[in-house]
Image: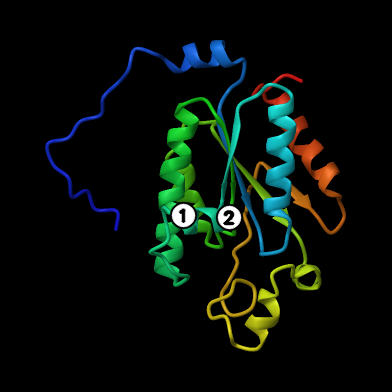
Amino acid sequence: MTTQKATNIKWHHGKISRDDRVNLMKQKGGTIWLTGLSGSGKSTIAVELEHALIENKHQAYILDGDNIRHGLNKNLGFSPEDRSENIRRIGEVAKLFTDANIITITAFISPYRQDRDNARKLFQAGEFIEIYIKCPLEVCEQRDTKGLYKKARKGEVKEFTGISAPYEEPLNPELTIDTSKMSIEESTRTIIAYLEEKGYVKF
């Protein structure tokens, strides 16, 4: 799916540089890649993080796993091949948002390490922030807000990550947040502190 089919094309550059955008927007764009099991808290943290950033006059936008599958990736299922293509497309979209100097927050299970590594390769150094939203499987199952784990245990949902499909933990994420030990507020503050420390934003 990654073979270049279009020919006679070239990348067009505008007159506005990345530095121009940084100076205008008073922030440094990047992609915050939240990865973890279903029910670990990725989407909830993404929503709180976006809200905190916007409230403090920073430009941020969430690319959420379920939302993307309603449109851009509605033709993809959950086979290993489709999961990889799902993440490839999201990586490309997140790169465009980052080029626009937006703080982009992605909330995807993205279970395969190689797919996440491939997404990272699209970005310049410092633009890709992998955050492992860690949570024990049993805790995720207890939350089970969508009832998906119960269905997966019954065999009603095929290729469900953590039950009938694997999840490969990140080896060297920029941050690891254990939501079985930290509240959503604490998790959000931890990410914001990282963004401040690394110079993406000022609060």
- Report crowding for label 1: few under 14, some 14 to 19, many 20 or more residues within 10 A (C-alpha): many
At label 1, the amino acid type is Ile
Name the quadrant containing residue 149: bottom right
On residue 174, the disc is none
Judge by depth and name the residue closer to the eye, 86 or 123. 86
Name the quadrant containing residue 193: top right
Q: Secondary structure at mark 1?
A: helix
**Which residue is pictured at 58% across the width and 85% down the height?**
156
Q: Secondary structure at mark 2?
A: loop
Q: CA distance from mark 2 to mark 1?
A: 8 Å
Name the quadrant containing residue 109: bottom right
Judge by depth and name the residue closer to the eye, 77 or 81. 77
Circle 2 is placed at which residue position?
108
Q: Is residue 10 above or below residue 35?
A: above
Q: Is residue 113 above or below residue 79?
A: above
**Which residue is pictured at 74% across the width and 67% down the height?**
145
Q: Is residue 156 above or below residue 159?
A: below
Circle 1 is placed at which residue position?
87
Q: Is residue 85 left or right of residue 110?
A: left
Sequence-earlier tag: 2 or 1: 1
Q: Position of residue 79 (x, y in %)?
A: 44, 72
> How are the colours assigned in the image?
rainbow
Which quadrant is home to the C terminus? top right
Q: Position of residue 29 (x, y in %)?
A: 56, 27
At label 2, the amino acid type is Phe
Which quadrant is home to the N terminus? bottom left
**Which residue is pictured at 86% across the width and 50% down the height?**
182
Q: Looking at the image, which residue sits at the far front? A: 70
The reply to whether the C-beta atoms of the residues labelled 2 and 1 are less than 8 Å apart is: yes
- Report crowding for label 2: few under 14, some 14 to 19, many 20 or more residues within 10 A (C-alpha): many
